[in-house]
Amino acid sequence: MACVCAILTPSCPTIPRRNRPSADEPLEGRLDSWKEIAAYLGRGIRTVQRWEREEGLPVHRLAHEKRGSIYARQEELAAWWESRRLTLAADSDPRTPLTRRLHPVSNE
């Protein structure tokens, strides 16, 4: 069982360093569930899970004894979204061969 002091003390020795909240990582920009991430991006939960799996959506995983939890930083999601937008815009250039163009498909 994880040490409860990690909530109060980020330097708790029983929690691996990679899973500890750091001073430069404020909680106000953090989305703590697939539901929150999906709402932030305006998509469904399965869509953002697929984007994480296939498109490199920046989601962080915390390992626990039974089930892992996930979180994402709003700044990282915004940067990823912008990079995807620019990639899609570049690929829709009429001079780009048809085989290289990406066409977004929505499941909604």
Image (cartoon, helix red, strand yellow):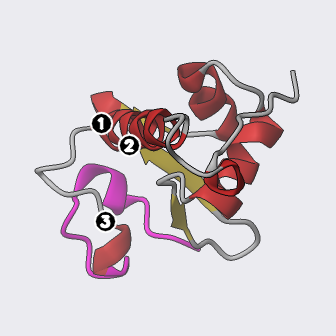
> How would you rate the neighbour count of disc 1 (Cα within 10 Å): few for under 14, some for 14-19, many for 20 or more?
few
Is the residue 87 above or below the residue 39 in the image?
Answer: below
Residue 4 covered by magenta stretch: yes
Say if mark 2 contacts mark 3, CB within 8 Å. Answer: no
Residue extending furthest toward the left: 24
Q: Main secondary structure of the magenta part?
A: loop
**Residue where numbered disc 2 is placed:** 83
The residue lying at 81 percent from left, 28 percent from top is 106
The residue lying at 77 percent from left, 35 percent from top is 45
Q: For the residue marked with disc 3, what is the amino acid? A: Arg
Question: In the image, 75: left or right of 40?
Answer: left
Q: CA distance from mark 2 to mark 1?
A: 12 Å
Q: Earlier in the sequence, mark 2 or mark 1?
A: 1
Locate the C terminus by quadrant.
Answer: top right
Q: Residue 75 has which mark? A: 1
The nearer-to-camera label among 1 and 3 is 1
The nearer-to-camera label among 2 and 3 is 2
Residue stretch in magenta: 1-16
Query: Residue 42 placed where, x, y %?
Result: 63, 18
Q: For the residue marked with disc 2, what is the amino acid? A: Ser
Is the residue 20 above or below the residue 42 in the image?
Answer: below
Q: For the residue marked with disc 1, what is the amino acid? A: Glu
Query: Residue 72 placed where, x, y %?
Result: 46, 45
Q: Residue 20 has which mark? A: 3
Q: Earlier in the sequence, mark 2 or mark 3?
A: 3
Residue 49 covered by magenta stretch: no
> How would you rate the neighbour count of disc 3 (Cα within 10 Å): few for under 14, some for 14-19, many for 20 or more?
some
